[in-house]
Amino acid sequence: MIQNVEMVKRNISFESHSNYVLVGLRRAGKSYLLYQRAQEMIALGHLPEEILYFNFEDDRLENLQLSDLDAIKQAYEEMYGHQPIFMLDEIQIIDGWEKFARRLADQKYRVYITGSNAKMLSSEISTTLGGRYMVQPVFPFSFQEYLTAQHFSLPAQWEYLQNSDLKRAFLEYFHIGGLPELVIVDNQFKREWLGNLYNKIYFGDLITRYGIRNPLAMKTLIRKLSESVKQPQSYNRLANLVSTVAGKVKQETIVDYLRYIKDTCLIFSIENICAKLQDRISNQKYYFIDNGFLSLFLFDPETSLLENLVAIHLHEKYGEDLFYYHDNVEVDFCLFEHQCAFQVSYSIKDAATRERELGALDEHKNRFKKLAVTDVLTRINNRHGFEEQVRQYLKKYPEASCVAAQFDIDDFKFINDVYGHESGDRALQILAESMRKSFPEHAVLGRKGGDEFCIFLDNCTGEEVRKKLEQFTKKKRSFWYEGEKVTYTISLGYAEYPLQGKNYSQLMRCADAALYEVKLDGKNGCLQYREGIGLEIRKQLGFALKDVSENLPGAFLIYKADKENDEILFANREMVRFTGCRTMAELQEYTKGSFRNLIEEEEREQVEESIWQQIGEGHSNDYVHFHLKKADGTSLRVLDHGRIVENGRYGRVFYVLMVDWNSTKRHYRDAF
């Protein structure tokens, strides 16, 4: 019984009304964290029978399919007559698990999920789950948790005591790591246990799962990462190192292999906070998620183990805020947002070592002031840095002509929603890099926030920079997503000082007004401010797609314009109501994601033939009426007005507006 399981209580708390995805390395304690949460809920008054726990690594569930999950849910509810609290362990084994998880959340079930794949941390999964789950990384034991598991209590003022037992415990943790199950393994077998677990991850989670055709290359890469855990490693260098042992290995293969290793939660990486975009991505420092794995590969490991242990602690506490700093001097760890930095040295008894380590921190402190006005993601000025430089210039040269431009990425929310926030960040970084390449060094470049950017060009007029700004606006930009090249555009407005703006605030408002004139005119344009453009024009764009679609006087639907695959992509609230469903997830399940399943079967062939005949005759619009098949078995007669359009992500799609035939006929009698 779960309530009788003995465990070390982890320092992780759960919000009582939220659903969770717990992600971490194999054997990091995710299952026991589920048990901990179950015990907490039982202590709060829930019955043990309310908790439905499934371990998908159980060999008796080996051939379980996505469709079986709903059968399990229904069987439980038939047995107990109430909604279960789902605890689904290692669910990533089931293809398409996120659809089931999203539906459970939509139906107001309480759900806890675990998985051993870092993809479950990604923005793509977060987007798929629609913000319905909180993601909680699970790490191996900290040293404090390790001591608790060993029933070791720290005495008062232990820092000042000579405690041989404490030292012995730390050395064991330092070399063997903090995987919870190691606590009960005899010392003589701990290294063997670690080796067996590593082999399971290597052969099962890497070689087999990803179909690695050159296992020696993967093995060599992991070893090289362990040997160079303190130094940044570029893709090119790693490719050359691996090629000397495992035959010619392309850089692209190394990139894939690193992603696979990260996805198993075996390693994590940090970027150089002061590097250019390309170097930040391709020249990172790599650390192992647990010292025990690192010690398997090293003969004289103390210096590497110490830095790796510090990296684990900082990564667990600060996540993506953690960087390293390397610009002539090197600082091991930098937390810019938290205004602190760390050097790790196994010994500073040597005077030269001490001077080098402390000198780097002093140099970093001096450069920290510049970082305070720098946008961390794009490495250009943040809002404060941009405004400060431009105001200083205008104060110093009040009569000089100059130009300020404001611009943003067209449909940036769509990029984040469809491709994920990582792709959105990539688009922002690429845009910032193109700013550096397109404008002179003395230009002031800034990111105001989100996808909004600005440029200040001194000693020029609007007419003199018009062509350059137009070329910059029309420049092609793209990022890669799952092998697909995704192109995006920008819109830009600019204004001239002092002709159109007499001070900084007025100048930027004029540029902003010109930008939104471009937006109203179709986007991906460049326009200088002129008299007559209202400074309040932005309010015309205050209607988000969701606001409009949800409040249309009719049902709105988007589906693929493909005779073989008419997948439903979007439905507004009224469309969901038309079908008798409660949520989009229910509609998708009821229709099996297909538009044709909304049409009564005896009308289906005729309606589809009519739609495609109208499109085949050269029309972009189609007009049909049919009986819409509702989830409760009844039907609703509807008028369907569709338009076929080209979409950058899905190709040809239909935008469809439906209205209730009988209701329309009743209100427009004279027209019928």
Image (cartoon, rainbow, N blue to C red):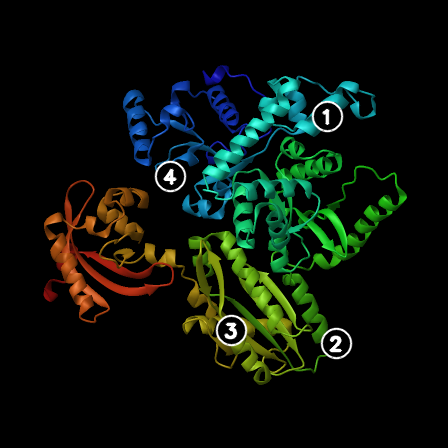
Nearest-to-viewer mark from 2 and 4: 4
The residue type indicated by label 2 comes to: Lys
Per the model, the C-alpha gap separating discs 2 and 4 is: 63 Å
**Residue positioned 49% across, 23% down in the render:** 35
**Residue positioned 66% across, 75% down in the render:** 440
| Label 4: element kind | loop
- 1 or 3: tag closer to the N-terminus: 1
The circle on residue 473 is 3
Residue 480 in percent (x, y) is at 48, 58
Q: Residues within 10 Å of mark 1 (few under 14, many from 20)?
A: some
The circle on residue 95 is 4
**Residue positioned 78% across, 52% down in the render:** 365
Q: In this view, does 492 lie to the left or right of 56?
A: right
Does the residue at mark 2 contact the one at mark 1 (Cβ under 8 Å)?
no
- 2 or 3: tag closer to the N-terminus: 2
Residue 579 in percent (x, y) is at 22, 46
| Label 3: element kind | helix
Nearest-to-viewer mark from 2 and 3: 3
Where is the N terminus found, in terms of image quarters?
top left
Total numbered labels: 4
Q: Mark 2 points at which residue?
A: 396
| Label 2: element kind | helix
Does the residue at mark 1 contact the one at mark 3 (Cβ under 8 Å)?
no
Q: Mark 1 points at which residue?
A: 170
Per the model, the C-alpha gap separating discs 4 and 3 is: 42 Å
The residue type indicated by label 3 comes to: Thr
Q: Is residue 28 visible?
A: no
- 4 or 3: tag closer to the N-terminus: 4
| Label 1: element kind | helix
Where is the C terminus found, in terms of image quarters?
bottom left
Residue 155 in percent (x, y) is at 76, 19
